[in-house]
């Protein structure tokens, strides 16, 4: 038993725990399409109609098997965003993102769920808004490896104006 009077020793260290996990047949199919053809696919629930990206074998809401594949476009709507003021290392590449930068959630036009990624826009609240239309920009095909790092960022579509606020 440790008593309050006992000295506790701590050793600060960084522990690197590399790991791999199996993507499974659905995510593998989706990531292979992304890598080889630059296309996104989701799956549609036969019961509630949700289109999930990333694709899941079973609908998270209805718990029924998803078997209908739906090709999704590269454009969607910004549903949420944050301006990051703290440095962040990209978990897929390890490269640092120096603040400030914008990170957002985009719902592709045919999907029910969102994708979270960098938004290639100046981190200025007057220049970004929920509802902004964006397009996914992918790595060049010869550089794609078949994971979400193949997405470089969301690019706002040109010619948009921020709606007036009442």
Image (cartoon, grey):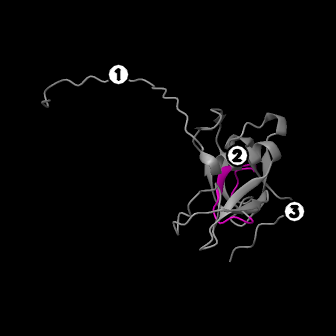
Q: Secondary structure at mark 3?
A: loop
Which circle marks residue 11 in the picture? Answer: 1
Residue 93 to residue 159: above or below: above
Labels in figure, total: 3
Left or right of residue 127: residue 52: left
Marks 1 and 2, how far apart at CA? 40 Å
The tag on residue 73 is none
Placement of 59 over or under 22, stated as above or below: below
At mark 1, the secondary structure is loop
x, y (%) of residue 52? 64, 61
Residue 35 is situated, as x and y percent measured from the top left of the image, at 76, 42
Is residue 103 something one can see in this rendering? no
Q: Are marks 1 and 2 in contact (CB under 8 Å)?
A: no
Image: magenta residue range? 109-125
Residue 1: which quarter of the image? top left
Question: Dots 3 and 2: beta carbons under 8 Å?
Answer: no
Circle nearer the viewer, 1 or 3? 1
Q: Disc 2 designates what residue?
A: 31
Please name the predominant secondary structure of the magenta segment in the image: loop
In this rendered view, identify the residue nearer to me: 92 or 166: 92
Disc number at residue 159? 3
In the figure, residue 36 lies in which quadrant? top right
Q: Is residue 60 magenta?
A: no
Q: Residues within 10 Å of mark 3 (few under 14, many from 20)?
A: few
Q: Residues within 10 Å of mark 1 (few under 14, many from 20)?
A: few
Q: Earlier in the sequence, mark 3 or mark 2?
A: 2
Disc 2 packing (10 Å; few <14; some 14–19; many ≥20): many
> What residue appears at the point 67 percent right and 61 percent down from the top-left corner?
43
- Residue under the image location 49 percent in, 26 percent down: 16
Give x and y (percent) for residue 157.
83, 58
Residue 6 falls left or right of residue 20? left
């Amino acid at each position: 038993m440790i008593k309050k009077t006992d000295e506790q020793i701590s050793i600060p260290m960084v522990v690197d725990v590399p790991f791999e996990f199996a993507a499974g047949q659905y995510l593998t199919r989706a990531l292979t399409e992304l890598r080889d053809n630059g296309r996104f696919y989701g799956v549609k629930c036969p019961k509630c109609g949700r289109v999930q990206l990333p694709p899941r074998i079973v609908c998270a809401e209805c718990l029924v098997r998803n078997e209908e594949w739906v090709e999704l476009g590269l454009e969607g709507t910004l549903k949420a965003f944050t301006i990051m003021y703290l440095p962040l290392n990209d978990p897929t590449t390890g490269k640092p993102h120096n603040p400030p930068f914008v990170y957002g959630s985009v719902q592709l036009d045919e999907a029910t769920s969102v994708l979270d990624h960098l938004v290639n826009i100046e981190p200025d609240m007057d220049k970004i808004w929920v509802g902004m239309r964006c397009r996914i920009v992918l790595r060049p095909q010869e550089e794609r490896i078949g994971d979400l790092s193949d997405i470089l960022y969301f690019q706002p579509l040109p010619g948009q104006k921020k709606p007036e606020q009442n």
